[in-house]
Image (cartoon, rainbow, N blue to C red):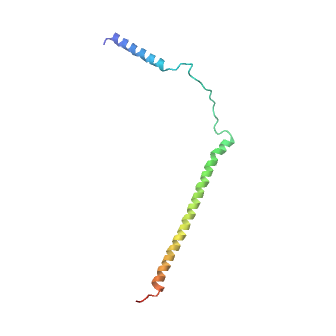
Amino acid sequence: MTPEEHSIELERIENEIRQRESRSRPDKQEIQYYQTTKVPHNQNEQTKGKLWKPKVILGLKLFGVGVVAIALVRVAAVVANLLIVGTLLFVGYKVFFEKKKNK
């Protein structure tokens, strides 16, 4: 391929690309612009209050769940101790104090 043929081919490709771009570009009349406004974040006291209140409520809920869990563990420990002591007393009574029946 000669340099002239190469430059002609490049121009042809460039023209094709321009035509595709012009077809894919929307008309300026179709473009709609909207006025935007900046929304201030955390400016007033109500917004600031809304940010920390859910965190405090969540913290109190977690604290309450922790207290209930500790109470349940302690109650379970007392019940387990009563069962152990009761079982030991029952076995001791059966072994040492119940009269044996002779057949």
The image shows residue 27 at horizontal and vertical percentages of 53, 19
Q: Is 75 in front, or is 45?
A: 75
Residue at (53%, 68%) from the top-left corner?
77
Q: In the image as oriented, which residue stretches furthest toward the bottom?
A: 102
Residue at (47%, 81%) from the top-left corner?
92
Residue at (51%, 73%) from the top-left corner?
83
How many labels sit on residues? Answer: 0
Asked if 39 appears above or below 20 in the picture, the reply is: below
Q: Is 42 in front, or is 57?
A: 57
Q: In the image as oriented, which residue stretches furthest toward the right?
A: 45
The image shows residue 100 at horizontal and vertical percentages of 44, 87
Asked if 7 appears above or below 83 in the picture, the reply is: above
- Residue 73: name its quadrant: bottom right
Q: In the image as oriented, which residue stretches furthest toward the front?
A: 103
Quadrant occupied by the C terminus: bottom left
Quadrant occupied by the N terminus: top left
Residue at (66%, 45%) from the top-left corner?
49
Q: In the image as oriented, which residue stretches furthest toward the top?
A: 4
The image shows residue 36 at horizontal and vertical percentages of 62, 29
Q: Is residue 7 left or right of residue 57?
A: left
Asked if 83 appears above or below 11 in the picture, the reply is: below
Q: Is residue 85 left or right of residue 63?
A: left
The image shows residue 71 at horizontal and vertical percentages of 57, 64
